[in-house]
Amino acid sequence: MRIPNLFSRNTAITIGGAVVVILIAWLFAYEPVTRSFVAADPVCAFCHLEREYSPAARLSFSTPHPAELKEGEFEARCVDCHLPEGFLPATFAYTHYLSATDLFGHFRDRASERAGAWIPQSAARAYRVRDRLLEYDSATCRSCHIEAEIKPKRKRGQKAHAKALEKKQTCSECHYNLVHREVDIRDVEVETAKTSGGG
Amino acid sequence: MTKRGLLAAAVILAAGPAFAADPATIDWPNISTNTVKLFFPGQSTYQWLRSSEHKRAQKETIKGEACTSCHEDEEAELGQITVSGDRLEPHPIEGKQAVIDLGVQVAHDSENLYFRYQWKTRNAFPGSAHPHWIYDGKDWKVMGWPRLHKNVWDDGKPAIYEDRLSMMVDDGSVPMFAEQGCWLTCHDGMRDSPDVASKDDTKANPLIGGVLKKSDVRKYLPSTRTDDNATWDQTKSAEEVAAVKAAGGFVDLMQWRGHRSNPVGMADDGYVLEYRLSDAGKGVFSKNWDKKANQPKYMFDEVKVGFKSRTLDEIRDTSKPTSLIPESNTVAFDPNAGWKKGDMIPEYYTTREGAKGSAADNSDVKGVWEDGVWTVLWTRKLDTGNPADDKIMKVGGVYTFNFAVHDDNITTRGHHVSWPMTLGVGAEADITAVTLK
């Protein structure tokens, strides 16, 4: 019996072509699919407790961003603040599983939570995010907020922004504790503010 | 020395003290007026300013940035937020002004600073009344409270409290005072602030209750507390506080008072360190109460003023004496003087003769209220000779001043305050004291 040649030249070309098409499609779809489906809010909430991080679940812990929606605006999703735009940064949505930092959030200290205490692990996560925002010049803020278009209405805001530009400060140096449960500022943050030209 | 020489020397010696100008004769219209905007701060305490509630400014405040680095020219806006009760004011007072414009003119010679202050009062009468003792037919009880007191707020009892004008002064010895001024001195735990300390807790504190024998918390500086948040009960030891004081780390605080100092042409003299304290010596006013006899010490001298007491309707009649002044208008209280229900005697007496030492340094301060405006002329020695509890100033020096006005029967947080600002004694500053020729 003769075994059919499954890998004829034509078949190989077809399969190869399909792989290339799929690869190209994947290249194009990777980031949007990751942002829209893999890192959709409900998926995030699987590990990161919804009541801890979602304003819809517990308004006293997290507040919507922006606090008041204007026409044409959308409420920020997890990825908007926590996953920088771009192909490679999207990979963080997969690699961050390795750290498994919040998977155990489901098994944490309930008594402290009931007492309103902000447990250290959660504070540590918040500090890591703050440090990343500082390191990457508040990249995720800037994906929505265009610096040149920010025109504070109040004189105080205008002065603060002018001063921040002069000092080369980044968004998160002033805008923190905006959305999730508040964490205390650290001495190092005050010190950093000092060396950034304040004082 | 010839007779003529002796006479000349005598004239010069006699004229010495007269080099100090009479503030009433200074050519004030030719001295520029600085309009200082005072605003209502509500409960913006040291701790609040360093909390996340002070949005986007927490870190800056902790590291010591100036209030005006963000809030310059915002007095009216901030005052409106607090008087309206939007933020930081749990008991908004209807009609309370968001800001008060304080006109400040300053001159100096080699000995003194001369201030002329002017501000409009909310009421169509001067705040020269203060709480009184009232006879209820059996006992003498307190009548009259500041407007934020629960007796007024909750029970609708009369708001009676003197008008005041205050100055805080530092010479650069108090860290951050130049930047944050009086906001270094107001804290959670104080009277009318968040989390008011209980009498028992205050008495149990080794410094406030133990050493100072106080039963409430008043202004203090963070340098007298051990924790970063300058919590009221985290007090340093008396020895540690004394070391701060010896290094000049206190803020001078002087207050002109419509009832308790103005009638004798004075202002009190105190300082802020571990508490708001009076300078050494004897102050210009004291409580009119004889603890032993459990009755007032003094009453008005009917022979001199035509009455021995007042009634609630009469205490604001400024055509007659409103304050008890032992050296001029009082006699010892007579429990058998035929008291009637509703008779009232001031709760405090004020005395120029009794004021002594550093506490009596402000001995030339006179306020006149006319057409809704207080005008206060205030002479302050540059060098009082009391460096232990006064800021000694020099010609050419620049100092940090903070101004406040208590208007409309109010005390504690109910005042209006300025940002800290510089005052130069003949030197360029936010306010320059003009050199008298």
Image (cartoon, helix red, strand yellow):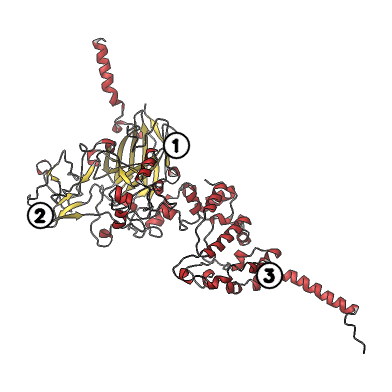
Position of residue B105 measured from the top left corner of the image (x, y, whole percent): 37, 37
10 Å crowding of disc 3: few (<14), some (14-19), many (20+): some
Q: Which residue is mark 3?
A: A32
Q: Is residue A85 above or below residue B321?
A: below
Q: Are marks 1 and 2 in contact (CB under 8 Å)?
A: no
Could you tell me which secondary element the residue under label 3 belongs to?
helix
Label 1 sits on residue = B429
* Secondary structure type for disc 1: loop
The answer to which of B323 and A109 lies nearer the viewer is A109
Amino acid at the residue labelled 1: Ala
Which element carries disc 2, helix, strand or loop? loop
Q: Residue furthest top?
A: B2
Crowdedness near tag 1: few (<14), some (14–19) or many (≥20) residues, C-alpha within 10 Å: some
Q: Which numbered disc flags the more N-terminal residue, 1 or 2?
A: 2
Query: Could you tell whether A10 is left or right of A162 in the image?
Result: right
* Horizontal relation, residue B74 to residue A102: left or right: left
Q: Which residue is mark 2?
A: B340
CA gap, disc 3 and disc 1: 59 Å
Determine whether label 3 and label 2 are within 8 Å by CB.
Answer: no
Quarter of the image with the N terminus of chain B in it: top left
Q: Chain of mark 2?
A: B
Give A80 or B36, whichever is nearer the viewer.
A80
Q: Which part of the image, by quadrant, shows the C terminus of chain B?
A: top left
Residue type of the residue flagged with mark 3:
Pro
Q: Looking at the image, which is closer to me, B331 or B63?
A: B63
